[in-house]
Image (cartoon, rainbow, N blue to C red):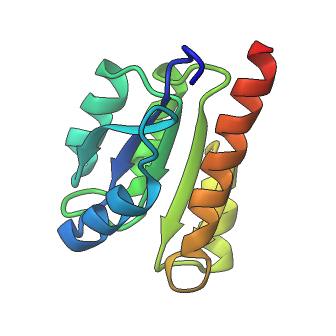
Amino acid sequence: MDNLTPLRVLLIEDSPLIRERLFESLVDPGRIEIVGEADTEEAAVALVGAATWDVLVLDLQLKHGTGLGVLRSLISHRAPEAKVIVLTNYAFPQYRAKSIALGADFFFDKSREYHRVREVLEGIAEKRVSAQH
């Protein structure tokens, strides 16, 4: 195994059940780690400002606040190479357009494209390994 730092992922999701499912399906020991979780806009904004992360997986509907508010806050808390994946049940064109305008790199519908999050993370992890060789 390489001595690379695993891909550090933040999960921002209001549903404990979906958060648990994401955790189980995304973690790949040594390659992909969940380094923080939040279920409100306020907690998410604090987390993205305090944690070191490579990828943010973000729901638009949160317990308090929205994922769009989190996206707005990223202007001052995001490394240039960090990626944002919006994963939502609100996969309407206007939300997609707004999310991309606010800096999201990917926008997926939870009901139809859930598996794409893992694919994107694996792709990013592979690029990191290739860049180190």
Q: Looking at the picture, how far across and down is residue 74, in whole percent?
A: 49, 32
Is residue 23 in sight in this rendering?
yes
In the picture provided, is 88 more to the left or to the right than 51? right
Q: Residue at x 57, y 58 (%)?
A: 118
Rendered position, 29 above or below 107: above
* x and y percentages locating residue 130 in the rendered image: 80, 25
**Residue 58: quarter of image:** bottom left
Most foreground residue, 106 or 97: 106
Q: Quadrant of the N terminus?
A: top right
Seen in the picture, residue 14 relative to 45 is either above or below; the reply is below
The image shows residue 97, relative to residue 124, as above or below, that is below
Along the line of sight, the residue nearer the viewer: 6 or 62? 6
Left-right relation of 18 to 92: left
Residue 103, given in percent of the width and then of the height, sits at: 64, 42
Q: Residue at horizontal 34%, vertical 60%?
A: 24
Residue 120 lies, in percent from the top left, at 67, 53
In this rendering, is residue 47 above or below 37? above
Quick one: quadrant of the C terminus? top right
Q: Residue at x 27, y 48 (%)?
A: 41
